[in-house]
Amino acid sequence: MTMLEHHLKASNETQAQFASRIGVRQGTVSKLMRGLVTPSLKLAQKIERVTNGAVPVSSWVEPVPSETLDAQSSQPAAKAAQPQEHPHVPDLQSSGSEAI
């Protein structure tokens, strides 16, 4: 169970109600709860704010295994890590359509 799912159950708030409070559609909240998408930093901050810290920004970040950190620290500085594609939720929708 995600922290968001736990918060919504504990607060008896529906996905639609929560979606309205953070400015996204109910389907987006469903995808966030199922881990299908990751919120943008701005949206994660808004979620943290409206949940009074019950769902912190850090809850959306997967910890990096220590082996990965050790391997990265032994690489030369000139060889930077390549960015990875990651689905995200747009900050706030300015139009009637929502892109994921």
Image (cartoon, helix red, strand yellow):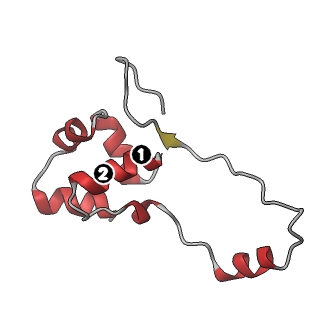
- In the rendered structure, which amino acid carries the disc numbered 1? Lys
Judge by depth and name the residue closer to the eye, 38 or 43. 43
Residue 97's place in the image compared with 39, above or below, is above
Q: What is the x, y in percent for residue 78?
A: 89, 62
Q: Amino acid at mark 2?
A: Ile
User: What residue do we see at 49% from left, 63% from top?
Assistant: 61
Q: Where residue 69 sits in the image (x, y, percent)?
A: 70, 77
Q: In the depicted view, which residue is nearer to us: 10 or 55?
A: 55
Report x, y in % for residue 11.
Answer: 11, 58
Q: Work out whether 97 lies above or below 53.
A: above
Residue at the top extreme of this rendering: 96
Residue at 84% from the left image edge and 79% from the top image edge: 74
- Residue 71 is left or right of residue 24, and the answer is right
Q: Are marks 1 and 2 in contact (CB under 8 Å)?
A: no
Q: Is residue 83 above or below residue 24?
A: below
Residue most extreme to the front: 77
Binning the other alpha carbons within 10 Å of mark 1 as few (below 14), some (14 to 19) or many (20 upward) gives: some
Image position of 47 with respect to 69: above or below: above
Which residue is the site of mark 2?
Answer: 47
Quadrant of image for the N terminus:
bottom left
Residue 7 placement: quadrant: bottom left
> Could you say which is closer to the camera, residue 80 or residue 37?
80
Where residue 2 sits, quadrant-wise, is bottom left
Give the labeled residue for mark 1: 42
Judge depth for marks 1 and 2 and give the one in front. 1
Taking the image as shown, residue 79 lies to the left or right of residue 12, namely: right
Q: Secondary structure at mark 2?
A: helix
Q: Does label 1 or label 2 sit earlier along the sequence?
A: 1
Circle on res. 66? none
Residue at x 38%, y 45% (from the top left corner): 43
